[in-house]
Image: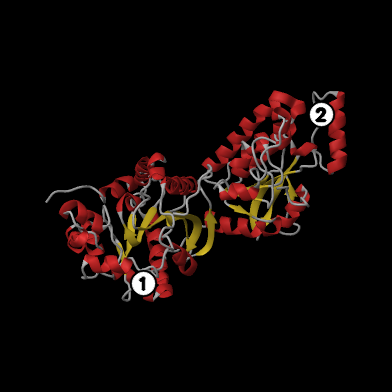
Protein backbone atom coordinates (compact mmCIF):
# COMPACT_ATOMS: atom_id res chain seq x y z
CA UNK A 1 0.00 0.00 0.00
CA UNK A 2 1.35 3.43 -0.86
CA UNK A 3 1.12 6.44 1.38
CA UNK A 4 -1.45 9.17 0.94
CA UNK A 5 -1.21 11.19 -2.27
CA UNK A 6 -0.61 14.52 -0.57
CA UNK A 7 1.77 14.98 2.36
CA UNK A 8 1.84 18.13 4.42
CA UNK A 9 5.07 20.02 4.81
CA UNK A 10 6.26 20.82 8.32
CA UNK A 11 4.78 24.32 8.21
CA UNK A 12 1.51 23.00 6.79
CA UNK A 13 1.20 20.47 9.61
CA UNK A 14 1.99 23.15 12.18
CA UNK A 15 -0.70 25.33 10.62
CA UNK A 16 -3.21 22.45 10.65
CA UNK A 17 -2.62 21.50 14.30
CA UNK A 18 -1.83 24.72 16.16
CA UNK A 19 -4.31 27.51 16.78
CA UNK A 20 -4.09 30.10 14.01
CA UNK A 21 -1.21 32.54 14.42
CA UNK A 22 0.07 30.95 17.64
CA UNK A 23 3.31 29.35 16.42
CA UNK A 24 6.62 30.75 17.64
CA UNK A 25 9.84 29.23 16.33
CA UNK A 26 12.57 28.15 18.73
CA UNK A 27 15.12 27.55 15.99
CA UNK A 28 18.50 29.25 15.83
CA UNK A 29 20.07 29.69 12.39
CA UNK A 30 22.09 26.76 11.10
CA UNK A 31 25.64 27.91 10.36
CA UNK A 32 26.57 28.18 6.70
CA UNK A 33 28.75 26.88 5.34
CA UNK A 34 28.01 23.76 7.40
CA UNK A 35 30.94 22.98 9.71
CA UNK A 36 33.09 20.17 8.30
CA UNK A 37 30.96 19.72 5.18
CA UNK A 38 32.66 18.70 1.96
CA UNK A 39 31.94 20.90 -1.05
CA UNK A 40 29.66 18.19 -2.46
CA UNK A 41 27.71 17.90 0.81
CA UNK A 42 27.45 21.69 1.13
CA UNK A 43 26.02 21.79 -2.37
CA UNK A 44 23.46 19.14 -1.38
CA UNK A 45 22.49 21.19 1.68
CA UNK A 46 22.04 24.31 -0.42
CA UNK A 47 19.82 22.45 -2.89
CA UNK A 48 17.79 21.09 0.04
CA UNK A 49 17.30 24.61 1.41
CA UNK A 50 16.06 25.86 -1.94
CA UNK A 51 13.78 22.87 -2.51
CA UNK A 52 12.20 22.81 0.96
CA UNK A 53 12.28 26.46 1.95
CA UNK A 54 13.65 25.29 5.32
CA UNK A 55 17.15 25.60 6.73
CA UNK A 56 17.17 22.06 8.19
CA UNK A 57 15.17 18.85 8.30
CA UNK A 58 13.25 19.74 11.49
CA UNK A 59 11.36 22.78 12.73
CA UNK A 60 10.80 23.32 16.45
CA UNK A 61 8.87 25.79 18.54
CA UNK A 62 5.71 26.27 20.53
CA UNK A 63 2.11 27.22 19.98
CA UNK A 64 -1.39 26.69 21.25
CA UNK A 65 -3.67 23.71 20.69
CA UNK A 66 -7.22 24.62 21.74
CA UNK A 67 -5.66 27.37 23.83
CA UNK A 68 -3.15 25.13 25.60
CA UNK A 69 0.58 25.82 25.26
CA UNK A 70 2.42 22.93 23.57
CA UNK A 71 5.96 22.43 22.27
CA UNK A 72 6.34 20.93 18.78
CA UNK A 73 9.06 19.19 16.78
CA UNK A 74 8.14 18.54 13.14
CA UNK A 75 10.20 16.97 10.37
CA UNK A 76 10.50 18.56 6.92
CA UNK A 77 10.80 15.54 4.63
CA UNK A 78 11.65 17.56 1.53
CA UNK A 79 14.94 18.53 3.20
CA UNK A 80 17.14 15.51 2.43
CA UNK A 81 14.32 13.06 3.21
CA UNK A 82 13.98 14.43 6.72
CA UNK A 83 17.30 12.86 7.67
CA UNK A 84 18.96 13.66 10.97
CA UNK A 85 22.46 15.06 11.06
CA UNK A 86 24.30 16.93 13.79
CA UNK A 87 22.47 20.24 13.31
CA UNK A 88 19.03 18.61 13.22
CA UNK A 89 19.84 16.48 16.28
CA UNK A 90 21.03 19.53 18.19
CA UNK A 91 17.86 21.39 17.24
CA UNK A 92 15.71 18.46 18.44
CA UNK A 93 17.49 17.95 21.76
CA UNK A 94 17.54 21.69 22.47
CA UNK A 95 13.79 21.86 21.91
CA UNK A 96 13.07 18.80 24.06
CA UNK A 97 15.16 20.14 26.93
CA UNK A 98 13.48 23.54 26.70
CA UNK A 99 10.06 21.89 26.74
CA UNK A 100 11.10 19.92 29.82
CA UNK A 101 12.47 22.99 31.58
CA UNK A 102 9.30 24.97 30.82
CA UNK A 103 7.03 22.03 31.82
CA UNK A 104 5.37 21.86 28.41
CA UNK A 105 3.78 18.82 26.78
CA UNK A 106 5.59 17.89 23.60
CA UNK A 107 4.15 16.85 20.22
CA UNK A 108 6.57 15.27 17.75
CA UNK A 109 5.71 14.81 14.07
CA UNK A 110 8.53 12.82 12.47
CA UNK A 111 8.74 12.09 8.74
CA UNK A 112 12.23 10.87 8.03
CA UNK A 113 14.38 8.27 6.37
CA UNK A 114 16.57 8.15 9.49
CA UNK A 115 20.22 9.00 9.99
CA UNK A 116 21.87 11.34 7.45
CA UNK A 117 24.25 9.11 5.54
CA UNK A 118 26.45 12.06 4.50
CA UNK A 119 27.43 12.49 8.19
CA UNK A 120 27.87 8.80 8.96
CA UNK A 121 28.41 7.37 12.43
CA UNK A 122 28.42 10.69 14.36
CA UNK A 123 24.87 11.36 13.08
CA UNK A 124 23.92 7.78 13.89
CA UNK A 125 25.09 8.24 17.49
CA UNK A 126 23.00 11.39 17.88
CA UNK A 127 19.91 9.17 18.16
CA UNK A 128 21.17 8.21 21.62
CA UNK A 129 21.23 11.85 22.71
CA UNK A 130 17.73 12.44 21.32
CA UNK A 131 16.44 9.36 23.15
CA UNK A 132 18.07 10.51 26.39
CA UNK A 133 16.30 13.86 26.05
CA UNK A 134 12.93 12.18 25.48
CA UNK A 135 13.55 9.95 28.48
CA UNK A 136 14.29 12.94 30.71
CA UNK A 137 11.10 14.65 29.48
CA UNK A 138 9.01 11.59 30.28
CA UNK A 139 10.70 11.10 33.65
CA UNK A 140 9.71 14.66 34.51
CA UNK A 141 6.09 13.48 34.24
CA UNK A 142 5.43 15.45 31.05
CA UNK A 143 3.39 14.12 28.11
CA UNK A 144 5.23 13.12 24.96
CA UNK A 145 2.85 12.60 22.03
CA UNK A 146 3.92 11.32 18.61
CA UNK A 147 2.29 11.71 15.19
CA UNK A 148 4.05 9.38 12.75
CA UNK A 149 3.96 10.77 9.21
CA UNK A 150 4.68 9.31 5.80
CA UNK A 151 7.35 8.00 5.68
CA UNK A 152 9.11 7.37 9.02
CA UNK A 153 11.82 4.72 8.97
CA UNK A 154 15.29 3.87 10.20
CA UNK A 155 16.88 5.44 13.24
CA UNK A 156 14.07 7.97 13.71
CA UNK A 157 11.45 5.22 13.93
CA UNK A 158 13.83 3.33 16.21
CA UNK A 159 14.30 6.23 18.62
CA UNK A 160 12.15 9.31 19.17
CA UNK A 161 9.43 8.08 16.80
CA UNK A 162 8.57 5.10 19.01
CA UNK A 163 8.62 6.56 22.51
CA UNK A 164 5.28 8.35 22.75
CA UNK A 165 2.94 8.02 25.69
CA UNK A 166 0.31 8.17 22.95
CA UNK A 167 1.27 7.43 19.34
CA UNK A 168 -0.96 7.98 16.33
CA UNK A 169 -0.15 7.93 12.64
CA UNK A 170 -1.09 9.46 9.31
CA UNK A 171 -3.38 7.26 7.18
CA UNK A 172 -1.44 5.14 4.71
CA UNK A 173 1.91 6.21 6.13
CA UNK A 174 4.90 3.95 5.48
CA UNK A 175 6.35 3.19 8.91
CA UNK A 176 9.08 0.74 9.81
CA UNK A 177 12.66 0.12 10.75
CA UNK A 178 14.08 -0.79 7.36
CA UNK A 179 13.33 1.40 4.35
CA UNK A 180 11.90 -0.61 1.43
CA UNK A 181 14.55 0.70 -0.98
CA UNK A 182 17.35 -0.47 1.33
CA UNK A 183 15.73 -3.88 1.73
CA UNK A 184 15.42 -4.36 -2.02
CA UNK A 185 19.01 -3.28 -2.59
CA UNK A 186 20.27 -5.70 0.07
CA UNK A 187 18.10 -8.71 -0.73
CA UNK A 188 17.21 -8.27 -4.39
CA UNK A 189 13.46 -8.50 -3.80
CA UNK A 190 10.78 -6.03 -2.75
CA UNK A 191 9.71 -5.94 0.87
CA UNK A 192 6.34 -7.67 1.43
CA UNK A 193 3.54 -5.22 0.74
CA UNK A 194 1.10 -4.09 3.42
CA UNK A 195 3.47 -4.68 6.34
CA UNK A 196 4.97 -1.24 6.91
CA UNK A 197 1.72 0.71 6.94
CA UNK A 198 0.02 2.73 9.65
CA UNK A 199 -3.08 0.55 9.40
CA UNK A 200 -1.11 -2.68 9.85
CA UNK A 201 0.79 -1.26 12.81
CA UNK A 202 -2.54 -0.34 14.41
CA UNK A 203 -3.86 -3.84 13.77
CA UNK A 204 -0.78 -5.30 15.46
CA UNK A 205 -1.07 -3.08 18.55
CA UNK A 206 2.00 -0.96 17.78
CA UNK A 207 0.23 2.41 17.56
CA UNK A 208 -2.90 3.80 19.17
CA UNK A 209 -4.83 5.21 16.20
CA UNK A 210 -4.70 6.22 12.54
CA UNK A 211 -5.67 9.88 12.30
CA UNK A 212 -5.76 12.34 9.37
CA UNK A 213 -3.95 15.63 10.01
CA UNK A 214 -7.17 17.62 10.25
CA UNK A 215 -8.27 15.55 13.26
CA UNK A 216 -4.94 15.59 15.08
CA UNK A 217 -5.58 18.76 17.11
CA UNK A 218 -8.75 17.23 18.57
CA UNK A 219 -6.95 14.02 19.54
CA UNK A 220 -4.07 15.94 21.15
CA UNK A 221 -6.51 18.18 23.02
CA UNK A 222 -8.45 15.20 24.35
CA UNK A 223 -5.27 13.44 25.46
CA UNK A 224 -3.86 16.52 27.19
CA UNK A 225 -7.20 17.30 28.86
CA UNK A 226 -6.75 14.00 30.72
CA UNK A 227 -2.96 13.93 31.05
CA UNK A 228 -2.66 17.47 32.39
CA UNK A 229 -5.84 17.65 34.48
CA UNK A 230 -5.17 18.67 38.06
CA UNK A 231 -8.58 19.08 39.78
CA UNK A 232 -8.44 21.03 43.02
CA UNK A 233 -11.94 20.45 44.41
CA UNK A 234 -12.97 17.26 46.19
CA UNK A 235 -16.29 16.03 44.73
CA UNK A 236 -19.26 15.61 47.02
CA UNK A 237 -19.62 12.30 48.76
CA UNK A 238 -22.09 10.33 46.60
CA UNK A 239 -25.10 8.53 48.13
CA UNK A 240 -23.55 5.19 47.20
CA UNK A 241 -20.82 5.77 49.80
CA UNK A 242 -23.45 4.97 52.44
CA UNK A 243 -24.83 1.86 50.69
CA UNK A 244 -24.55 -1.36 52.67
CA UNK A 245 -24.18 -4.69 50.83
CA UNK A 246 -27.33 -6.65 50.16
CA UNK A 247 -28.40 -9.69 52.14
CA UNK A 248 -29.21 -11.94 49.17
CA UNK A 249 -27.38 -15.20 48.59
CA UNK A 250 -24.23 -15.42 46.50
CA UNK A 251 -25.72 -17.62 43.78
CA UNK A 252 -28.45 -15.10 43.03
CA UNK A 253 -25.78 -12.42 42.47
CA UNK A 254 -23.78 -14.75 40.24
CA UNK A 255 -26.79 -15.36 38.02
CA UNK A 256 -27.50 -11.61 37.83
CA UNK A 257 -23.85 -10.91 36.92
CA UNK A 258 -24.03 -13.32 33.97
CA UNK A 259 -26.81 -11.47 32.19
CA UNK A 260 -25.43 -10.54 28.76
CA UNK A 261 -27.37 -7.26 28.93
CA UNK A 262 -25.50 -6.17 32.05
CA UNK A 263 -23.55 -2.89 31.56
CA UNK A 264 -19.91 -3.52 30.78
CA UNK A 265 -16.82 -1.31 30.75
CA UNK A 266 -17.66 0.08 27.31
CA UNK A 267 -21.04 1.29 28.54
CA UNK A 268 -19.58 2.66 31.77
CA UNK A 269 -17.21 4.82 29.72
CA UNK A 270 -19.93 5.81 27.26
CA UNK A 271 -22.47 6.81 29.92
CA UNK A 272 -20.27 7.86 32.83
CA UNK A 273 -16.93 9.23 31.58
CA UNK A 274 -15.75 12.03 29.31
CA UNK A 275 -12.70 12.85 27.20
CA UNK A 276 -12.28 9.12 26.66
CA UNK A 277 -9.32 8.32 24.41
CA UNK A 278 -8.86 4.59 23.74
CA UNK A 279 -5.30 3.35 23.49
CA UNK A 280 -4.35 0.30 21.48
CA UNK A 281 -2.13 -2.64 22.27
CA UNK A 282 1.08 -3.13 24.13
CA UNK A 283 3.14 -0.97 21.75
CA UNK A 284 5.24 -4.12 21.26
CA UNK A 285 3.34 -5.92 18.53
CA UNK A 286 0.46 -7.35 20.55
CA UNK A 287 -3.13 -6.48 21.24
CA UNK A 288 -5.88 -8.55 22.78
CA UNK A 289 -9.60 -7.76 22.61
CA UNK A 290 -9.96 -9.10 26.14
CA UNK A 291 -8.72 -5.80 27.61
CA UNK A 292 -9.59 -2.13 27.11
CA UNK A 293 -7.00 0.59 27.84
CA UNK A 294 -7.92 4.27 27.73
CA UNK A 295 -7.39 7.77 29.05
CA UNK A 296 -10.56 9.19 30.61
CA UNK A 297 -12.06 11.59 33.12
CA UNK A 298 -14.82 10.81 35.58
CA UNK A 299 -16.22 14.19 36.48
CA UNK A 300 -13.07 16.28 36.81
CA UNK A 301 -10.92 13.34 37.91
CA UNK A 302 -8.45 12.10 35.27
CA UNK A 303 -7.22 8.53 35.19
CA UNK A 304 -5.74 5.72 33.17
CA UNK A 305 -8.45 3.09 32.73
CA UNK A 306 -7.73 -0.55 32.09
CA UNK A 307 -10.19 -3.36 32.39
CA UNK A 308 -11.74 -6.52 31.08
CA UNK A 309 -13.78 -6.30 27.91
CA UNK A 310 -16.54 -8.80 28.49
CA UNK A 311 -17.12 -10.91 25.34
CA UNK A 312 -20.32 -9.83 23.64
CA UNK A 313 -20.94 -13.25 22.12
CA UNK A 314 -20.08 -16.79 23.28
CA UNK A 315 -16.72 -17.89 21.95
CA UNK A 316 -15.24 -14.39 21.67
CA UNK A 317 -11.77 -13.77 23.01
CA UNK A 318 -11.26 -13.61 26.75
CA UNK A 319 -8.29 -12.21 28.62
CA UNK A 320 -4.98 -13.72 27.56
CA UNK A 321 -1.35 -12.90 28.33
CA UNK A 322 -1.25 -10.04 25.80
CA UNK A 323 -4.11 -8.39 27.70
CA UNK A 324 -1.98 -8.22 30.81
CA UNK A 325 1.02 -6.92 28.92
CA UNK A 326 -1.25 -4.17 27.63
CA UNK A 327 -2.51 -3.60 31.19
CA UNK A 328 1.06 -3.20 32.39
CA UNK A 329 1.59 -0.55 29.71
CA UNK A 330 -1.30 1.32 31.38
CA UNK A 331 0.25 0.90 34.82
CA UNK A 332 3.53 2.35 33.57
CA UNK A 333 1.70 5.30 32.00
CA UNK A 334 -0.07 6.02 35.27
CA UNK A 335 3.18 6.01 37.21
CA UNK A 336 5.16 8.04 34.72
CA UNK A 337 2.49 10.73 34.30
CA UNK A 338 1.44 10.84 37.95
CA UNK A 339 -2.15 9.87 37.18
CA UNK A 340 -4.47 7.65 39.21
CA UNK A 341 -5.16 4.18 37.82
CA UNK A 342 -8.63 2.64 37.55
CA UNK A 343 -8.81 -1.11 36.95
CA UNK A 344 -12.15 -2.72 36.04
CA UNK A 345 -12.78 -6.40 36.77
CA UNK A 346 -15.46 -8.26 34.85
CA UNK A 347 -14.37 -11.71 33.74
CA UNK A 348 -15.63 -15.27 33.86
CA UNK A 349 -12.01 -16.35 33.79
CA UNK A 350 -8.79 -15.94 31.84
CA UNK A 351 -8.05 -17.70 28.57
CA UNK A 352 -7.58 -21.44 29.08
CA UNK A 353 -5.68 -22.55 26.01
CA UNK A 354 -2.38 -23.82 24.76
CA UNK A 355 -1.65 -20.38 23.32
CA UNK A 356 -2.22 -18.73 26.71
CA UNK A 357 0.04 -21.22 28.46
CA UNK A 358 2.81 -20.84 25.91
CA UNK A 359 2.33 -17.08 25.98
CA UNK A 360 3.13 -17.00 29.70
CA UNK A 361 -0.28 -16.27 31.21
CA UNK A 362 0.68 -17.31 34.74
CA UNK A 363 3.79 -15.15 34.67
CA UNK A 364 1.82 -12.17 33.35
CA UNK A 365 -0.72 -12.52 36.18
CA UNK A 366 2.16 -12.57 38.65
CA UNK A 367 3.80 -9.52 37.09
CA UNK A 368 0.51 -7.63 37.03
CA UNK A 369 -0.01 -8.33 40.75
CA UNK A 370 3.60 -7.32 41.42
CA UNK A 371 3.19 -4.02 39.58
CA UNK A 372 -0.20 -3.15 41.09
CA UNK A 373 0.75 -3.87 44.68
CA UNK A 374 3.82 -1.65 44.24
CA UNK A 375 2.26 1.02 42.01
CA UNK A 376 3.48 4.50 42.89
CA UNK A 377 0.25 6.13 41.65
CA UNK A 378 -3.03 6.17 43.60
CA UNK A 379 -5.31 3.39 42.43
CA UNK A 380 -8.94 2.28 42.45
CA UNK A 381 -10.24 -1.12 41.37
CA UNK A 382 -13.82 -1.79 40.39
CA UNK A 383 -15.65 -5.12 40.60
CA UNK A 384 -18.24 -4.57 37.90
CA UNK A 385 -19.62 -8.07 37.47
CA UNK A 386 -18.01 -11.49 37.33
CA UNK A 387 -14.66 -11.91 39.06
CA UNK A 388 -13.35 -15.41 38.45
CA UNK A 389 -9.85 -16.69 38.92
CA UNK A 390 -6.42 -15.26 38.24
CA UNK A 391 -7.76 -13.04 35.50
CA UNK A 392 -9.78 -11.14 38.11
CA UNK A 393 -7.07 -11.17 40.76
CA UNK A 394 -4.56 -9.71 38.30
CA UNK A 395 -6.42 -6.36 38.27
CA UNK A 396 -7.60 -6.26 41.90
CA UNK A 397 -4.93 -4.70 44.18
CA UNK A 398 -5.68 -1.01 44.75
CA UNK A 399 -5.94 1.68 47.40
CA UNK A 400 -9.73 1.49 47.22
CA UNK A 401 -12.10 -1.04 45.69
CA UNK A 402 -15.62 -0.31 44.49
CA UNK A 403 -18.09 -3.13 43.85
CA UNK A 404 -21.43 -3.31 42.11
CA UNK A 405 -24.00 -4.89 44.39
CA UNK A 406 -24.10 -8.15 42.43
CA UNK A 407 -20.39 -8.43 41.64
CA UNK A 408 -18.37 -11.31 43.07
CA UNK A 409 -14.81 -12.59 43.40
CA UNK A 410 -13.79 -16.25 43.45
CA UNK A 411 -10.75 -18.47 42.77
CA UNK A 412 -12.85 -20.29 40.15
CA UNK A 413 -16.36 -20.05 38.80
CA UNK A 414 -18.50 -21.78 41.48
CA UNK A 415 -19.18 -24.72 39.16
CA UNK A 416 -15.44 -25.37 38.96
CA UNK A 417 -15.01 -25.15 42.71
CA UNK A 418 -17.93 -27.55 43.19
CA UNK A 419 -16.42 -30.02 40.72
CA UNK A 420 -13.11 -29.99 42.63
CA UNK A 421 -14.61 -30.37 46.12
CA UNK A 422 -17.76 -32.41 45.44
CA UNK A 423 -17.01 -34.08 42.10
CA UNK A 424 -20.14 -32.44 40.65
CA UNK A 425 -21.15 -28.98 39.49
CA UNK A 426 -24.57 -29.34 41.08
CA UNK A 427 -23.41 -27.86 44.39
CA UNK A 428 -22.16 -24.61 42.87
CA UNK A 429 -24.68 -22.45 44.81
CA UNK A 430 -23.54 -23.99 48.08
CA UNK A 431 -19.87 -23.50 47.19
CA UNK A 432 -20.42 -19.87 46.26
CA UNK A 433 -21.92 -19.14 49.67
CA UNK A 434 -19.29 -21.11 51.56
CA UNK A 435 -16.36 -19.49 49.76
CA UNK A 436 -17.33 -15.90 50.61
CA UNK A 437 -17.49 -14.68 47.03
CA UNK A 438 -20.28 -12.09 47.36
CA UNK A 439 -19.87 -8.40 48.04
CA UNK A 440 -21.11 -8.57 51.66
CA UNK A 441 -18.31 -11.00 52.50
CA UNK A 442 -15.74 -8.86 50.69
CA UNK A 443 -16.86 -5.80 52.66
CA UNK A 444 -16.49 -7.71 55.94
CA UNK A 445 -13.05 -8.83 54.83
CA UNK A 446 -12.04 -5.20 54.19
CA UNK A 447 -11.38 -5.76 50.48
CA UNK A 448 -14.35 -3.72 49.19
CA UNK A 449 -14.65 -0.11 50.39
CA UNK A 450 -17.61 1.24 48.42
CA UNK A 451 -20.75 -0.53 47.16
CA UNK A 452 -22.92 0.78 44.31
CA UNK A 453 -26.48 -0.48 44.54
CA UNK A 454 -28.44 -2.06 41.70
CA UNK A 455 -32.15 -1.30 41.48
CA UNK A 456 -32.59 -4.27 41.53
CA UNK A 457 -30.45 -5.36 38.58
CA UNK A 458 -28.01 -3.19 36.58
CA UNK A 459 -29.15 -4.86 33.37
CA UNK A 460 -32.57 -3.25 33.79
CA UNK A 461 -31.28 0.29 34.40
CA UNK A 462 -28.02 0.48 32.47
CA UNK A 463 -27.64 4.24 32.01
CA UNK A 464 -28.76 5.12 35.56
CA UNK A 465 -26.51 2.43 37.07
CA UNK A 466 -23.52 3.66 35.05
CA UNK A 467 -24.21 7.19 36.26
CA UNK A 468 -24.14 6.08 39.91
CA UNK A 469 -21.02 4.01 39.31
CA UNK A 470 -19.28 6.93 37.58
CA UNK A 471 -19.97 9.21 40.55
CA UNK A 472 -18.55 6.57 42.87
CA UNK A 473 -15.44 6.28 40.68
CA UNK A 474 -14.99 10.06 40.61
CA UNK A 475 -15.25 10.23 44.41
CA UNK A 476 -12.86 7.34 45.06
CA UNK A 477 -10.28 8.62 42.56
CA UNK A 478 -10.29 11.96 44.37
CA UNK A 479 -10.24 10.33 47.81
CA UNK A 480 -7.25 8.05 47.20
CA UNK A 481 -5.26 10.98 45.80
CA UNK A 482 -5.64 12.69 49.17
CA UNK A 483 -4.32 9.72 51.16
CA UNK A 484 -0.75 10.11 52.48
CA UNK A 485 1.72 8.87 49.89
CA UNK A 486 4.46 7.89 52.32
CA UNK A 487 2.67 4.75 53.55
CA UNK A 488 0.52 4.06 50.49
CA UNK A 489 2.13 0.74 49.61
CA UNK A 490 1.92 -0.59 53.17
CA UNK A 491 -1.76 0.35 53.50
CA UNK A 492 -2.51 -1.22 50.14
CA UNK A 493 -0.75 -4.47 50.96
CA UNK A 494 -2.44 -4.68 54.37
CA UNK A 495 -5.87 -4.97 52.70
CA UNK A 496 -4.95 -8.42 51.42
CA UNK A 497 -3.03 -9.75 54.42
CA UNK A 498 -4.04 -13.23 55.50
CA UNK A 499 -5.33 -13.61 59.05
CA UNK A 500 -6.43 -16.48 61.26
CA UNK A 501 -9.31 -16.29 63.68
Quadrant of the rendered image containing residue 363:
top left
Q: Determine the residue located farthest toward the left in the rendered image.
A: 501
Which residue occupies 42% across, 47% down? 324
Rendered position, 128 above or below 141: above
Q: Residue 187, percent across and down?
A: 69, 29
Q: Nearer the viewer, residue 374 or 23?
A: 374
Query: Which one is closest to the eye, mark 2 or mark 1?
Result: 1
Q: Nearer the viewer, residue 347 or 446?
A: 347
Q: Residue 284, percent across and down?
A: 53, 42
First-in-chain label (2 vs 1): 2
Instruction: Determine if residue 198 is in view.
Output: yes
Which residue occupies 62% across, 31% down? 129
Q: Nearer the viewer, residue 212 or 121?
A: 212
Quadrant of the rendered image containing residue 42:
top right
Which residue occupies 81% across, 29% down? 34
Where disc 1 sits, the SS reads helix
Instruction: Determine if residue 143 is in view.
Output: no
Left or right: 307 as drawn, with respect to 14: left
Which residue occupies 76% across, 47% down? 10
What color scheme is it? secondary structure
Where disc 2 sits, the SS reads loop
For label 2, count other residues whose C-alpha is less than 10 Å away and answer few (under 14), some (14-19) or many (20+).
some
Left or right: 83 as drawn, with respect to 334: right
Q: Residue 335, percent across and down?
A: 45, 46
Q: Which residue is mark 2?
A: 34
Quadrant of the rendered image containing residue 449:
bottom left
Q: Which residue is mark 1?
A: 458
Cα separation, mark 2 vs mark 1, equals 69 Å
Circle 2/circle 1 CB separation < 8 Å: no
Q: Residue 15, percent across and down?
A: 75, 55
Amino acid sequence: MSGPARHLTALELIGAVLDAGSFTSWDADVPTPYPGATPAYEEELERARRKSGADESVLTGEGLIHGRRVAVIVSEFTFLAGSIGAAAAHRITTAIRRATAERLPLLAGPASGGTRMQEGTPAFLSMVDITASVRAHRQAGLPYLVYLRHPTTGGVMASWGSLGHVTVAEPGALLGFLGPRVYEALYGAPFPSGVQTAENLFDKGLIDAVVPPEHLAGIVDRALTVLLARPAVMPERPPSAAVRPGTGDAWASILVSRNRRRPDLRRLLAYGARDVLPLNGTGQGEKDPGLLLALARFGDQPCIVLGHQRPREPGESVMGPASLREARRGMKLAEELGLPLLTVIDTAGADLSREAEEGGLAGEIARSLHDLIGLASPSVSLLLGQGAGGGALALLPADSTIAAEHAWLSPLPPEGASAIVHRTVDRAPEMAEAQGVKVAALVRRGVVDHVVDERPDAAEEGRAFCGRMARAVEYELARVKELPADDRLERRAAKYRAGIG
